[in-house]
């Protein structure tokens, strides 16, 4: 990794108050890089790190043009995540928001844009074992998050030019201290006894420790500011060693005194339940997420892990924190009451 943010002087992070965004901010500030954060609120945690908070909405193009001014590097981390909600809402944030970030970067002469994407863009309801970046986009994504992130990623890669160098990262199942999504939801359902092993329980998946994901973002930016071999490219990011999903979950549960998940449900039954719940929640126009969806059923039952050789070769990415050490840090954080 280049020393002291070489090639980067003033960076802006959209969604810089979120789990991934804040980790990127922390890495930037550790290197003494002047950092601004864009979000719909002020983020005390980012301000404590020395970042400047710019309050606004990425869906507001004029705001984004003003926010980006004076920065040489932009990390576009903000997105509407999750697997439930209206298409219009996902489209406005993930597609229109990305279009606005791109327009702002062009108008203000930003040289480097690192976009946070997701492996969900290639997930098509079948096992993926060791897949690489040549995998095609899914033609039948089962959630609006995936379908809008496909469009956003395509726009970012298409925008790559000599004036604005762009790249997209696809970190998979990000976890660690500070997580507000995956781990808390797993623990809540585990304590409720509502989790079920979907399918055989032998499916292997990639996971990504938060600090490693943040490292990958800075490596990508440094590459774009330098040799630019990553320009216009996309990269899978993970620990580099897939885990058996349900074994990993139960090992974590054992560390925090949550009963292991033992009850099972066939994938076909989970898919049917997911489809029925999707219809039911849609008819009632419920905003809360169904306990099961077709996308979630497939994610829990199928293997989805990827080669990170491209990231190793072009970005010099290597996961510094092992999964074992990451679990130790996560458990310590959980035991302190977050």
Image (cartoon, grey):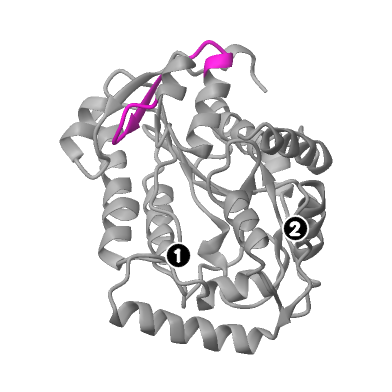
What is the crowding at mark 2: few (fewer than 14 residues within 10 Å), some, or many (at least 20)?
some
Q: Position of residue 129 (x, y in %)?
A: 74, 67
Rendering coords of residue 225 (x, y %): 51, 25
Look at discs 1 and 2 and give the one toward the viewer.
2
In front: 13, or 276?
276
Few, some or many C-alpha atoms within 10 Å of disc 1 (few <14, some 14-19, many ≥20)? some
Closest to the observer, 96 or 323 = 323
Q: Is residue 246 above or below residue 239?
A: below
Residue 54 is inside the magenta segment: no
Residue 30 position in % (x across, y down): 58, 15
Sequence-wise first label, 1 or 2? 1
Check whether the beta carbons of the residues at disc 1 and disc 2 lie within 8 A of each other. no
Q: Secondary structure at mark 2?
A: helix
Magenta span of residues: 29-43
Q: Which residue is mark 1?
A: 83
Per the image, the residue denoted by label 2 is 249
Q: Is residue 103 left or right of residue 262?
A: left
Q: Which quarter shows the N terminus? A: top right
Residue at position x 78%, y 79% in the image: 200
- The answer to whether residue 247 is above or below residue 76 is below
Q: Residue at x 82, y 53 (%)?
A: 254
Mark 1–mark 2 distance (CA, rounded to whole Å): 21 Å
């Amino acid at each position: 990794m280049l020393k002291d943010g070489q090639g980067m002087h003033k960076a802006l992070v959209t969604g810089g108050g979120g789990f991934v965004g804040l980790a990127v901010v922390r890495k930037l500030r550790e290197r003494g890089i002047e950092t601004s954060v864009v979000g719909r609120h002020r983020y005390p945690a980012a301000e404590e790190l020395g970042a400047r908070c710019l309050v606004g909405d990425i869906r507001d193009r004029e705001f984004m043009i003003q926010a980006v001014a004076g920065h040489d590097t932009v990390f576009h981390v903000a997105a509407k995540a999750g697997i439930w909600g209206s298409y219009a809402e996902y489209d406005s944030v993930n597609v229109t928001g990305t279009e606005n970030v791109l327009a702002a970067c062009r108008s203000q002469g930003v040289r480097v844009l690192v976009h946070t994407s997701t492996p969900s863009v290639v997930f098509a309801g079948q096992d993926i074992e060791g897949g690489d970046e040549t995998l095609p986009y899914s033609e039948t994504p089962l959630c609006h998050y995936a379908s809008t992130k496909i469009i956003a990623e395509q726009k970012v890669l298409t925008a790559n030019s000599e004036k604005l160098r762009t790249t997209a990262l696809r970190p998979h199942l990000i976890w660690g201290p500070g997580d507000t999504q995956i781990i808390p939801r797993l623990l809540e359902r585990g304590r409720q006894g509502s989790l079920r092993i979907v399918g055989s329980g032998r499916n292997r998946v990639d996971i990504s420790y938060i600090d490693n994901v943040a490292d990958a973002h800075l490596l990508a930016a440094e590459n774009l500011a330098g040799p630019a071999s990553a320009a216009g490219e996309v990269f899978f990011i993970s620990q580099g060693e897939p885990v058996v999903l349900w074994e990993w979950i139960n090992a974590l549960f054992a560390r925090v005194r949550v009963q292991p998940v033992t009850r099972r449900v066939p994938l076909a039954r989970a898919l049917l339940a997911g489809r029925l719940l999707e219809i039911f929640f849609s008819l009632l126009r419920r905003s809360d997420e169904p306990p099961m969806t077709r996308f979630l059923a497939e994610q829990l039952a199928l293997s989805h892990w990827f080669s990170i050789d491209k990231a190793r070769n072009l970005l010099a990415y290597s996961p510094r924190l092992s999964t074992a050490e990451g679990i130790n840090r996560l458990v310590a954080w959980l035991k302190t009451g977050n």
